[in-house]
Every structure is written in C-alpha cells, then in structure tokens.
Image: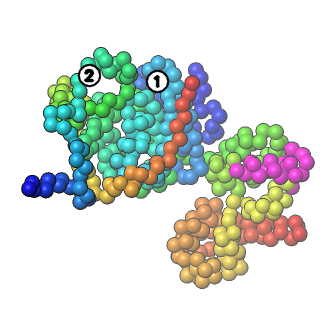
C-alpha cells in the first residue's frame, strides 16, 4: 500500500491545488530587446523589470556615472495601506 | 513686454518678485521653490495659478498645472503612488502644494532631501524599493499656506518665501467692481462695501455676487451709499465687516466703558481664547478697542456703535 501523498499547504492553511506553481526549469522572465520594446513603448512609458536586475545594473550605473544625488530614506512607521487607499484631492490644468 | 498678472489687483511687491522669477525662468528653465505666505483670501492660490500660466515647456507649450490640497495627502507612499508616478515623474509640470502646513511628517522629511539643492537641478529620492527622480528643469514646485508657522522650519528654510501684503480699501473696491462691471457704484458705496470684506479679496468676490442679486431685485444697475445701508440691513452685514460677536463685545464696552477679559467671558459666554483670538484681534486692527490690561472702547468704537443704533432706527 502506498502512503498518502504529502500535502503542501497555502499560507492560510488550505491545501494547495496539485499542479499549481512554477514548473521546474520554467521562468517568469523572458528576453526582449530594447529595439522590440521601443516599437510599442515611448521613452516616458514605464516598463516592468526585475527588481534585482534593476538594483544591480541601473542603480549601480547611475551611481557611477551621473551627477544625480542618490539618497536613502528609511520607511517610516504609520505608512499603512488604508492611508494609501485614500484619494489625494488634486486639480490638473492642461493646455492645448 | 507682455503685462503679466494684469487681471489681478494690488500685491505690487509680489508681482515684481514673480515677474523676476519668470524672467529668470525664461533664461534658465528653473525656478526657486516658491513659498507663498499670507492671510486667507489674499490671492495666494490665484497668483500661483497665474504664475504657472507663464511657465513654458522646452517645446514652448504652456506647462500643465497641478494643484494639490495637502490636507488630503496622508503619507509618502500615497503621494508617490497616486501623484508623483502618474503625473509628475518625467513630465514637465508645475505643482502647487496648497495648504502646505498640512503636509504629512514623512513627506515633509522626504522633501527635506528633495528640495535641498545647493547645486544641480536633479535630485533622486530613493524610498523603499523605488527611485524617484526630480528634475527641476522639468518640474516647478510651489507651496502656499496661511499658516507658515506650522510648516516645519527645516523645510521652510529650503523654500523662497513670497509674502503677501494686505489690500487697501481701494484695491478691494477694484476687485469687487471687476466682478460686476455692469453695475455702477458711487465711490463711497464701493469703499464701504470693500471694507465689509475684512481685507479679504475672496470675500469681495462673494460680496459682488450679493450686490448683483440686490441690484437685480431693485431693478437697476446703480449702487449708492443709500443702497449700502439697505443692502447691509437685508443681509445682516455690519459696517467694516464686524461680525455679531465682535459687535456684541463693542456694545458691552460702549455701555460699561471698560471691562476685564473675565467680564467679557461672563457676558458673552465665550472662552478667554475665543475672545482673544477671534474677537479682539480684528477690533484692535480696526482701532475700535484698545487693551491695557482692561479692554476699552475707542472713540471710533463708540462712534461705530452709535452710528449702528442710528441706522437701525432709520431703517425701521
């Protein structure tokens, strides 16, 4: 008789569905050339990139080359999610 | 040379300074972080808007103007998520932080870093996992408040203060007249009307609307001193814009000649602070009372109450 299969549980304690999760060897990232991206995006558009890659390459590069001041600011207590949800009142006037 | 701020009255010094910064902006594409300070209704926000109208992007187009009410900003995260990233970052824009004394503490702290620019026109703020670039050639930041004393001094030190002066009765009259050009005022009536605004330009605009309604009901477009008395009676407006609590204090002092603060508290039912802060300041400003330990009514104060009683009888 075979033993029961090991159950993997989610954070809330419920059993995880079999087959869910990343398959071994698969990756969430893929290679896209900047040229390809520029076909669909403009200079000001935000492109989601990996945080580790960004920290390793972009920030290091900026630190090394630019005259920009890079500062650190530690997160403060009281920055709660509820406050983030509240809308800031603003008025934007644009001209043709 | 084009005349800037032409449709705004008074504030000559402010206009001169803002013109100076606009001229400098044309050459450098940068502007100091201006901090507009003054009592309510002096036109800080309106001047900031007009200032923004004259700022141009690199391509010569007028720069968008973003007006933020700081009392609705709760923290740094909310500011970057809702405003900085979608509207400011990498864009050419003018940003006005109105009611700047309401800025949350953590954003004030962040701004100490951002606006500390002895040299250069860029600043990068790193916060949590993000980088937030500020480019002061692309972005112009303005601040405004009535309560400059509540702004954290280190932040205030990083800003260039532009302080607003009181309007003269004549300038207030011009503001009022400009709102209702079709109505013809006698000079005296216009000055008396302007005085009821308590030096507040915004009140003048509101008063103009009331005059418009009054004249429409009356059936003509002429407003004279005789109309002023009827107008005030109908709307419960006291001369010099004195409110009813201030008038009550004046009436007490007219009757008794003088009174201690405690006596005024007892007779009006108001707290000491309320009397000192909300009542006595304006009466002293208008020279209707004086304080030397006890509160005394001045000659102008006595005349004011006597005149009011006289007008009341006449209108009845």
In the rendered image, residue B284, in percent from the top left (x then y), is placed at: 60, 64
Left or right of B284, for residue B188 = right
B301 sits to left or right of B154: right
**The magenta stretch spans which residues?**
B206-226
* Outermost residue toward the front in this view: A1
**Position in image of residue A58 (x %, y %):** 21, 29
| Subunit ID for the residue under disc 1 | B
Relative to B222, say whether B118 is above or below.
above
Q: Residue at x 54, y 34 (%)?
A: A93
Q: In this view of the protein, which residue sits in the foreground, B155 or B199? A: B155
Dominant SS type (magenta): helix
Q: Is residue B222 magenta?
A: yes
Q: Is residue B31 magenta?
A: no
On the same chain, marks 2 and 1? The answer is: no
The residue drawn where x is 64% and y is 48% is B201
Separation of marks 2 and 1 at Cα, in angstroms: 33 Å
- Residue B188 can be seen, yes or no: no
What residue would you read off at disc 1?
B57
How crowded pointer 2 is (Cα within 10 Å; few <14, some 14-19, many 20+) is rated as: few
In this rendering, the answer to whether B218 lies above or below A30 is below
Colouring chosen for the image of the structure:
rainbow
Residue linked to disc 2: A32
Q: Secondary structure at mark 1?
A: loop
């Amino acid at each position: 008789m075979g033993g029961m299969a090991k159950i993997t549980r989610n954070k809330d304690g419920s059993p995880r569905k079999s087959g869910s999760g990343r398959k071994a060897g698969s990756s969430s990232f893929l290679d896209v050339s900047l040229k390809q991206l520029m076909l669909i995006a403009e200079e000001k558009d935000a492109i989601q990139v990996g945080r580790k890659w960004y920290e390793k390459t972009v920030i290091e590069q900026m630190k090394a080359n630019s005259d920009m001041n890079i500062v650190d600011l530690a997160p403060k207590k009281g920055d709660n999610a509820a406050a983030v949800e509240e809308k800031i009142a603003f008025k934007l006037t644009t001209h043709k | 040379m084009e005349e800037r701020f032409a449709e705004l009255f008074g504030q000559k010094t402010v206009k001169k300074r803002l013109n100076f910064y606009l001229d400098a902006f044309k050459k450098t594409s940068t502007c100091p972080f201006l901090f507009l300070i003054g009592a309510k209704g002096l036109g800080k926000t309106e001047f900031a808007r007009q200032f923004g109208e004259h700022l141009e992007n690199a391509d010569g187009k007028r720069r968008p103007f973003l007006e933020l009410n700081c009392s609705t900003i709760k923290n740094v995260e909310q500011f970057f998520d809702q405003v900085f990233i979608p509207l400011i970052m990498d864009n050419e824009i003018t940003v006005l932080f109105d009611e700047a004394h309401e800025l949350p503490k953590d954003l004030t702290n962040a701004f100490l870093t951002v606006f500390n620019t002895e040299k250069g026109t860029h600043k990068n703020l790193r916060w949590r996992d993000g980088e937030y670039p500020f480019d002061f050639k692309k972005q112009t930041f303005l601040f405004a408040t009535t309560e400059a004393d509540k702004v954290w001094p280190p932040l205030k030190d990083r800003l260039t203060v532009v302080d607003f002066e009181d309007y003269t009765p004549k300038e207030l009259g011009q503001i009022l007249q400009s709102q209702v050009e079709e109505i013809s005022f006698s000079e005296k009536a216009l000055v008396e009307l302007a005085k009821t605004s308590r030096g507040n330009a915004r009140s003048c605009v509101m008063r103009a609307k009331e005059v418009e309604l009054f004249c429409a009901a009356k059936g003509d477009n002429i407003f004279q001193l005789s109309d002023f008395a009827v107008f005030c009676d109908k709307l419960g407006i006291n001369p010099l814009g004195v409110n009813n609590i201030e008038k009550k204090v004046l009436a007490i002092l007219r009757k008794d000649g003088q009174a201690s603060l405690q006596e005024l508290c007892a007779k009006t039912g108001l707290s000491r602070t309320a009397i000192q802060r909300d009542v006595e300041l304006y009466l002293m400003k208008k020279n209707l009372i004086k304080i030397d330990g006890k509160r005394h009514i001045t000659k102008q104060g006595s005349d004011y109450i006597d005149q009011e009683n006289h007008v009341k009888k006449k209108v009845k």
